Image (cartoon, rainbow, N blue to C red):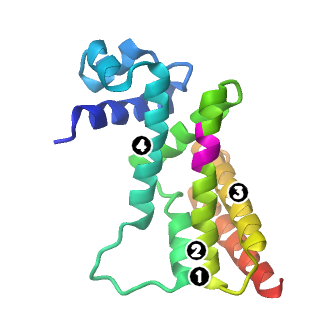
Amino acid sequence: MASRSTQILEAAARVIARRGVRGLRVEELAAEAGVSTALIYYHFKDRTGVLRQTLEFINDRAERYTTDRDPDDPPLTPREELEETLLLELQDTVEVRENSSAWGELRASAVFDEVLREDLARATLVWVQEVAALLGRVHPMAPASSLAAAAERLTALLEGLGMRWLSGGIRIGHARELMSGAIDAELAGLRQG
């Protein structure tokens, strides 16, 4: 059974995904999590604490669903690992839909919330660095600045495709095709550069 703080963070991700950051009320979160408001304040101090910890929670959850593999599966090539990691952000599961929606809502709210903006910038930087490292495993001789730029483009595109898919602008299969094409283009650019 999940700990109380994890239970609250799962509920916070659901509420943010459905109603946005501005729609997150501690009372509603308590009802969604099946806990008292006092327990939320005990674990997170205030609403900002809930938001910061929810951002960390959705990042950790995304890391799990994009990197967990069956140890009995054959190892992936660096290229396959890169593509799998990015495309697993475009899968039609409740967890991914909720994570992507909550991430988008947190990003939109960060425009007006400096504390959230700083936390989101750090989380984004870590994500870009992780993708740059995966790109570097495919092209180990590529300059670090080229790897970082390619990772920046891929993660930004992935966010945009995710939002278009979630909002019904494109089908998930098309989003995945576009992402695969972008990966091919970035790898070709790194090969030439």
Tell us which disc is closer to us: 4 or 3.
Answer: 4
> Where does label 3 land, which residue?
157
Q: How crowded is mark 3: few (under 14 residues within 10 Å), some or many (20 or more)?
A: some
Q: Name the main secondary structure of what is drawn in magenta.
A: helix
Q: Which of marks 4 and 2 is nearer the N terminus?
A: 4
Q: Distance between the residues labelled 2 and 1?
A: 5 Å
Tell me the CA gap for discs 3 and 2.
Answer: 16 Å
Q: Is residue 167 visible?
A: no
What residue type is disc 3 on?
A: Leu
What percent of the width, then of the height, locates residue 92?
A: 46, 54
Number of marks drawn: 4
Tag 1–tag 4 contact (CB < 8 Å) = no
What residue is drawn where x is 62% and y is 50%? 124
**On the image, numbered disc 1 is attached to which residue?**
137
Mark 3 or 2: the one toward you: 2
The kind of residue tagged 1 is Arg
Q: What element carries label 4?
A: helix
Residue 167 - label: none
| Residue labelled with disc 2 | 134
Q: Which residue is drawn at 30% across and 74% down?
A: 70
Quadrant the C terminus occupies? bottom right
Whether the magenta-drawn stretch holds residue 146 is answered as: no
Residue 57 circle label: 4
The image quadrant that residue 29 belongs to is: top left
Residue 76, given in percent of the width and then of the height, sits at 45, 84
Magenta segment: 119-123
Q: Distance between the residues labelled 4 and 3?
A: 22 Å
- What is the distance, in whole Å, between disc 1 and disc 3 at their CAs? 21 Å
Q: Which of 112 and 28 is in front in this view?
A: 112
Q: Seen in the image, is 53 located left or right of residue 191?
A: left
- The reply to whether residue 20 is visible in this rendering is yes
